[in-house]
Image (cartoon, rainbow, N blue to C red):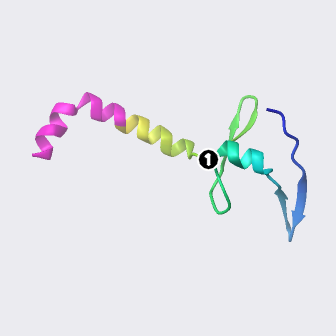
Amino acid sequence: MNMPLKITKVGNSAAVILPKELLARLRVSLGDTLFATESPDGIRLTASDPDFAAKMALAEEIMREDRDILRVLAK
């Protein structure tokens, strides 16, 4: 997908208008938060927090490894 975006002035800041097709593809709407992260090929814009995703992956790994201990602690 190659979609040019125009930078406009909003007060003392700059803003990018996201077309409705892009909002639909990101599955976001007004009031939602987007996350911009730097990647080797530029800036990546996502609707999910990459830090939270990494923490959840680590938590899932720990829960898999220590399943028996967690089961005992839950009793």
* Most foreground residue, 48 or 54: 48
In this rendering, would 54 be left or right of 65?
right
In the displayed structure, 14 sits above or below 52; it is below
- The total number of labels drawn is 1
Q: Residue at x 13, y 44 (%)?
A: 73
In this rendering, would 46 be left or right of 19?
left
* Most foreground residue, 50 or 24: 24
* Most foreground residue, 50 or 31: 31
Quarter of the view holding residue 55: top left
**Magenta region includes residue 64:** yes
Residue assigned mark 1: 47
Q: Residue at x 19, y 39 (%)?
A: 70
Picture quarter with the N terminus: top right
Q: Residues within 10 Å of mark 1 (few under 14, many from 20)?
A: some
Chain part drawn in magenta: 60-75
Q: Position of residue 31 (x, y in %)?
A: 64, 63
Q: Position of residue 17 (x, y in %)?
A: 82, 55
In this rendering, would 51 be left or right of 69?
right
Looking at numbered disc 1 in the image, what kind of residue is underneath it? Answer: Ala
